[in-house]
Image (cartoon, rainbow, N blue to C red):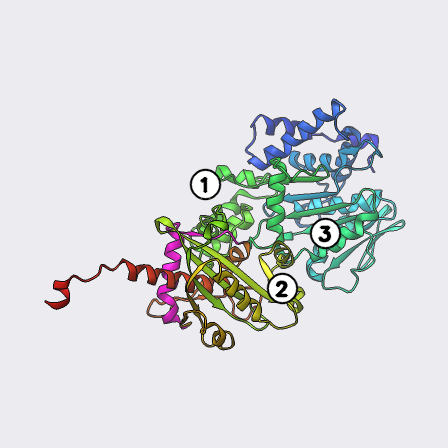
Amino acid sequence: MARKENMEKIKFTYLKYINDVSNSRIPTCKMVKLAVKRHIKDIKASEEGTFPYYFDHKKAQAAIVFFSQLVHTKGKLAGQKLKPEPWQQFIIASLYGWRRRDNNKRRFRRAYIQIARKNGKSFLAAGVSLYDLLTEPGAEVYSAATKKDQARIVFEDAKKTVQYSADLKKYIKPLAHSLTCSDGFMKPLASDSNTLDGLNPSCAIIDEYHAHKTTELLDVIETGMRARQQPLMFIITTAGNNRNAPCFEEYEKCKKMLAEANGYENDEYFSIIFELDKGDDWKNEKNWYKANPNLGVSVELDAMHTAFREALLSNSSETAFRTKNLNEWLNVAEVWINDRSWAHCFHRYAEKNLEGLRCWGGIDLSKRLDFTVLTWYFELPKGKRYAKHYFFIPEGQIDIKMKQDSYRIRSWIKQGFITATPGETQDFSFMLNIIREDAKKYDIQEIAYDRNLAEYLIQDLAAEFTCVDFSQSIVGMSEPSKAWEQAILDNKIIDNNPVMAWMVSCATVKPDANGNIKPIKPDTNKTSKRIDGVITSIMANNRLEIALADEAKAPLSVDEMFF
């Protein structure tokens, strides 16, 4: 469809966009500037012959011409041709212009685009899927999501695009559940379907990746792509409100890649992230353009003002506005200890320095669903304390926990942050053995426990250690919980454990009529939130603080004792 006459009619703006971003002529964030800087750097390396890739302007412009033939499918402009904006042209040109020197195939096999809602994500997703369907021999294009309904959204957008375009209908046949073109097809694909085996994808569109709880679907697709010479995993999403989702990890990885951090280099991964910069005032309208390059085009300024006014009225509306309209990663408002506060607990500390130090413990036991946890709090100089955790789960529960709790369970086991015990239920002897081994290195003062859960273990522990029954009622937990929160805010706690960071992000509190609080899961009916490490940390910290307070009391003088 990229005929010569069409190319002469199209105004190519991607080079001007590169120039404007480089010279700060338009409001853009650091990540966009780095994406453009990367392109310029790679162009220079290519021209010097030191780069295994080259940029083909004809290929880039042919793709832009194709995208320019796509039409609006909704509203009063339905049926009219779309006009790729300069920033969109830059993405299209990057994906299809960069080529490998060894075989002239596309350079980029994976793309991550993060942008605020209403900025033309559907247009890009539909264009990428249809271009692959038309140009890739034996194309297998999938619109992939965790649920069937979500998977059909991008598919239906692409289907409507074909139905509205007389040119596309010459080559692509729209059917109820697929689009066909010669020997290729496009279909929706959901992780809850039974068709994940035997895939050979040439292109996969992952829309709103922030909603995915695991990497399972992407892993299956990526494995299926290995036989392809130039596959494309196209991830396009808005930020979410769960920093423990795999999308946030992908976002962080892409930022490090763009910043050229050691270990994150990937010449076959394209990324561009439209967001506010750190320190930007989200209430300042001038900053909105950074996350919304289509502000004033597909994003109506009046609509943004309306959403902004609503954001000023409630925390939930503010979270929604900043996440969806400003593309900012936020944890849900109900989280007790926010990410920023917990981040102050991360400090380097060599655990070999703990040998011989006093510590206080907290244990929380579970047979199957929850984690079994042992936490030590060590007394350090200047009021500081160091947290050391042991997390246990039965081996038979790993796959379930990866789906329900966190996709990172297996990697945490591999890294040594979680111990997998044999069988379907928890074997408490592993914890008992670790406590005995730690007693050879550390000066264990007390171990706090919940008598409702620890009856089996305590019978053995009490014979060797001082064990303290710790009430789990809201009254019994309230003051220790408040004290632990204050210790975090006062930067007294060092805790570098990623499993603990996840559990902190899962915890919320619900006060009673008397102002008492106790950490709870946001929804006790859902099994995907775990706070066991929070409970053991509160217990251990409380016993440490009580001991230090008792020691701080001055001894009575003789006069005070007898007169």
Give the crowd class for mark 1: few <14, some 14-19, many >=20 residues within 10 Å.
few
Is 201 covered by the magenta stretch? no
Say which residue label 2 marks.
420
Say which residue label 1 marks.
281
Residue 264's quadrant in the figure? top right
- Whether residue 230 sits left or right of residue 345 in the image: it is right
Is 476 covered by the magenta stretch? yes
For the residues carrying marks 3 and 1, which lies nearer the camera in this image?
1
Q: Tell me which label, 2 or 1, sits earlier in the chain.
A: 1
Residue span colored magenta: 473-497
Q: CA distance from mark 3 to mark 2?
A: 45 Å
The quadrant of the rendering that contains the N terminus is: top right
Q: Is residue 327 visible?
A: yes
Say which residue label 3 marks.
157
For the residues carrying marks 3 and 2, which lies nearer the camera in this image?
2
Q: CA distance from mark 3 to mark 1?
A: 35 Å
The quadrant of the rendering that contains the C terminus is: bottom left
